[in-house]
Amino acid sequence: MTLTERSTLGTVVAVVSAALRRHRVPAVLTGGACASLYTDGRYMSADMDFILIGPATQAGLDAALGSIGFGRRGDRYVHARTRFYVEFPRGPIAIGGDYRVAPVERRTRFGRFLLLSPTDACRDRLAAFYHWNDRQSLEVAVAIARRHRLRMDGIRRWSVAERSADRFAEFLQELRRAGTRRARRGRALGARAGLRS
Amino acid sequence: MVVNSSSPFGAQTRTRVLLALTLLGDSYPRELSRVLQLPLSGVQRALQSLERDGLVAGRSAGRTRLFRLEPRYFAFEALQAFLRRLTEPESELRTRVTTLRRRPRRTRKPL
């Protein structure tokens, strides 16, 4: 599979993951790229953060990514044909204080890869909202929650542990508001369609 | 450079930067360099490596990069408690930090 300017994030992730697997480098996709995949590109992220879950050497990473045309520039791997780049933040995989994170597998026609579950991708964004007051992350967390069935009780418990119960309440409020806005838009579209017919 | 204190986070500068951030909350490289009396380039290198390790995080405020301990780090609370303990005997550093004015000052108010 040759990467091009038109390759989507999902395709690039699958190709990178396949290359890592071929070179026996076990890794999990985390961060903004997961949010991007779970919001169907509504939130765009150009960086693919892979956390290594097994032993790997710099030479091994260079060889794996070099085999698909990525070259190392500082801490990141870039490709001439795609704007998506790869980084390997230090592990463990953790969301706030919770390091018991179980990745899920996603299958595409270009291969399968491990990534955060929708619930964990949502928590990951909420962590940025809770601790950095990043409202963009709140919006993305809401967008993930609107598209996926999440384990809300687990998110609530984790939010309490992060001392952010009030912020979790704000998240729920935003989620309800987004639902109302969508329902209103749906009714308006329905009414317009009714007028036309 | 203080060489007689322990350095559990690798190079002395890394440990000193973490101690200063613990006392200051957030800070920028030049301020850290002044407080720690260390060369700016060394402080910048230490911040980069601590950022790579996920122990500190920086955000842009205008043209300045503001750094603090990363609150999303999985062992943040334990790390903070450890660093607080490590700052206790650092009387010289504590004194230098207390000489910094950090409270707001109305724009154009004379000193």
Image: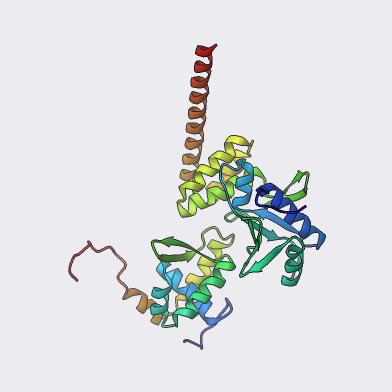
Quarter of the image with the C terminus of chain A is top right
Residue A47 picture location, percent across and down: 61, 56
Front-lying residue, A30 or A152: A30
In the depicted structure, whether residue A182 falls above or below residue A19: above
In the depicted structure, whether residue B23 falls above or below residue A139: below
Residue B83 picture location, percent across and down: 50, 71
Q: Is residue A195 left or right of residue B34?
A: right
In the depicted structure, whether residue B78 falls above or below residue B20: above
Residue B57 picture location, percent across and down: 51, 63
Q: How many marks?
A: 0
Question: Which residue sits at x=51%, y=84%?
Answer: B5
Residue A37 picture location, percent across and down: 64, 45
Residue A60, located in which quarter of the rendered image? bottom right
Front-lying residue, A12 or B6: A12
**Residue A56 shows in the view:** no
**Residue A66 shows in the view:** yes
Question: Which residue sits at x=58%, y=62%?
Answer: B75
Front-lying residue, A151 or A62: A62
